[in-house]
Image (tube, rainbow, N blue to C red):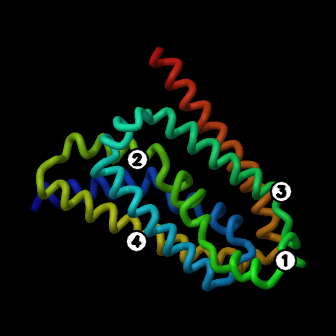
């Protein structure tokens, strides 16, 4: 039981820190500024589920998948950086009135989609190269049955926490108002681009050090 609890709390704390759902709140608000409460709730749930699936896969088969495709953690960082930067440019260039004049069928399709729940929210904004590499390394040192069960439980719990954090983000939008959200979107967009570029720089530096 001691091994189970120790593994659970160690991985839970590490994952929560690396995933940093609190830090994702401004990004979530900016990306879902045109969504109603129900849509935000749906995106929050799907993002949490996607994160859970990504983390489970990373823990159990991450090492084999990367080896099979010949992908390095640096490559994951570069790909993640590109996706994050692309999302940032989207926020910087967002036009709140852009959806006016769209046909009803297209509008309904846009409202029903939760594509941002996978990218960029679930990956790479939350479950990025950091959490993937953490789980791959953690799996190497924790291979007993209690440790595997405890690690799996940690992943489920942190996914639940992500849902709760993102689910409450709409209250922030309520108090800020439309103009406040637009302003935050521009600021967050700039910061998101910077974060994406930093991911790429870190990967490049890691590659250079390994030469």
Q: Earlier in the sequence, mark 3 or mark 1?
A: 3
Which quarter of the rendered picture does the N terminus lie within? bottom left
Badge 1 density bin: few <14, some 14–19, many ≥20, Cα 10 Å: few
Q: Are marks 4 and 2 in contact (CB under 8 Å)?
A: no
Q: Nearer the viewer, mark 1 or mark 4?
A: 1
Look at the picture and state if 22 lies above or below 71.
Answer: below
Q: Nearer the viewer, residue 129 or 186?
A: 129
Look at the picture and state if 64 lies above or below 95.
Answer: above
Q: Earlier in the sequence, mark 1 or mark 4?
A: 1
Badge 2 density bin: few <14, some 14–19, many ≥20, Cα 10 Å: many
User: Residue under circle 3?
Assistant: 93
Distance, label 1 to label 2, CA atoms, is 39 Å
* Image quarter of residue 196: top right
Q: Residue at x 54, y 31 (%)?
A: 203
* Image quarter of residue 66: top left
Q: Residue at x 26, y 65 (%)?
A: 153
Distance, label 4 to label 2, CA atoms, is 18 Å
Q: Nearer the viewer, residue 33 or 5?
A: 33
User: Residue under circle 2?
Assistant: 132
User: Residue under circle 4?
Assistant: 160
- In what element is the residue under mark 3? loop
Q: Earlier in the sequence, mark 4 or mark 2?
A: 2
Q: How many marks?
A: 4
Look at the picture and state if 88 lies above or below 194.
Answer: below
């Amino acid at each position: 039981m001691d091994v189970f609890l120790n593994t659970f709390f160690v991985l839970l704390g590490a994952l929560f820190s690396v995933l940093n759902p609190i830090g994702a709140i401004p990004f979530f608000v900016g990306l879902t500024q045109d969504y109603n409460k129900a849509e935000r709730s749906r995106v929050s749930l799907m993002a949490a589920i996607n994160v859970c699936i990504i983390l489970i896969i990373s823990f159990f088969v991450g090492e084999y998948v990367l080896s099979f495709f010949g992908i390095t953690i640096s490559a994951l960082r570069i790909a993640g950086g590109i996706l994050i930067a692309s999302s940032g440019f989207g926020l910087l260039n967002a036009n709140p009135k852009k959806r006016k004049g769209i046909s009803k069928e297209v509008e309904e399709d846009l409202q029903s989609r939760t594509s941002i729940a996978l990218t960029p929210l679930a990956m790479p904004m939350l479950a990025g190269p950091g959490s993937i590499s953490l789980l791959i390394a953690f799996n190497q040192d924790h291979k007993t049955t209690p440790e595997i069960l405890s690690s799996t439980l940690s992943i489920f719990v942190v996914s639940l926490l992500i849902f709760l954090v993102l689910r409450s983000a709409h209250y922030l939008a309520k108090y800020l108002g439309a103009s406040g959200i637009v302003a935050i979107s521009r600021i967050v967009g700039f910061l998101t681009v910077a974060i994406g570029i930093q991911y790429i720089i870190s990967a490049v530096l890691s590659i250079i050090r390994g030469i």
